[in-house]
Amino acid sequence: MVLIIRSGLQVRHQQKPPAFYTPKKGGKKVSINLWLHTGLDLLWLANGVVFVVLLFVSGHWARIVPTSWEVFPNALSAALQYATMEWPVEDAWVNYNALQQLMYFIIVFIAAPVAAITGVRMSEWWPKDAATLNKIYPAPLARAIHFPTMLFFVFFILVHVFLVFTTGLRQNLGYMFAGTNMLGWAGLIWFLVAMVVVVAGWFAARPLLLAPIANLFGRVSSR
Ligand code: HEM
């Protein structure tokens, strides 16, 4: 997500892109930043498809899909509880509270698909000559939605990580990164390894290192 957000912002702010990419099988030339952004998006989507399939096959969907309207008043009640600084710290993994359930549902089943359909609309993969479709769903509309969707992801990540840290860091990281209930160090260690990968990815995502990879899939040029 860090690299997706970073490359998206680079696309947004680029004046003169450092390099360009042209697909092997032809197609429009895009900036190397956009190549990175859409390339990561494909990996993210593939990962998401696996996640959603496993979610339903395993029956775990019931944990994040609300099945009663009560989720709304209950989420409000949970929000009030959070506001009193009385955070639920026990069994956070066994049972999500209504606010967690609602937020996870929105991220997986609303925000991610919205990012995808607005992103694809702006991308080279979208059919350009579908006149009626493009009139109902113009690219500027997709752009206007795509950016706030990113802001929502950032908001979610900040709150989520903050609460993971403040409601039992070692225990929560154990659940998340080591898949264990035991209060050991494995989760924290894996988390730190993951952070090293994130930071390394951040610094590696520069034209000089991206160009050889992009060259495997197409042609990189300086203009
Ligand atoms: C399937 C998923 C996605 C696809 C296909 C996609 C595609 C695109 C494309 C084609 C652009 C370039 C728009 C332009 O040329 O102006 C773009 C911009 C951007 N993307 Fe994505 N994207 C996806 C997911 C995401 C996600 C998950 C995030 C962040 C959470 C994100 C953040 C951004 C940002 C910040 C921009 C710059 C927006 C702007 O210029 O206003 N994208 N994306």
Image: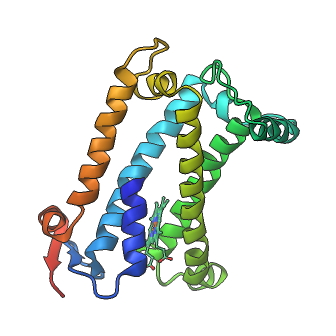
Residue 124 seen anywhere in this rendered image of the structure: no
Query: From the viewer's perspective, is 126 left or right of 74?
Result: left
Please give the count of numbered marks on the rendered protein. 0
Q: Quadrant of residue 39?
A: bottom left
Query: From the viewer's perspective, is 168 left or right of 30?
Result: right
Query: From the viewer's perspective, is 133 left or right of 165?
Result: right
Above or below residue 162? Residue 114 is: below
Along the line of sight, the residue nearer the viewer: 31 or 196? 196
Q: Quadrant of residue 152?
A: bottom right
Q: Residue at x 29, y 35 (%)?
A: 193
Q: Residue at x 24, y 62 (%)?
A: 205
Along the line of sight, the residue nearer the viewer: 7 or 46? 7
Q: Quadrant of residue 105?
A: top right
Q: Residue at x 61, y 79 (%)?
A: 141
Above or below residue 24? Residue 68 is: above
Return the x and y of residue 164 as percentages of the image width and height: 55, 34
Q: Residue at x 61, y 71 (%)?
A: 145
Query: From the viewer's perspective, is 194 left or right of 206?
Result: right
Image color mode? rainbow
**Residue positioned most to the front:** 85
Above or below residue 138? Residue 146 is: above
Residue 22 seen anywhere in this rendered image of the structure: yes
Along the line of sight, the residue nearer the viewer: 188 or 211? 188
Return the x and y of residue 222 as percentages of the image width and height: 15, 84
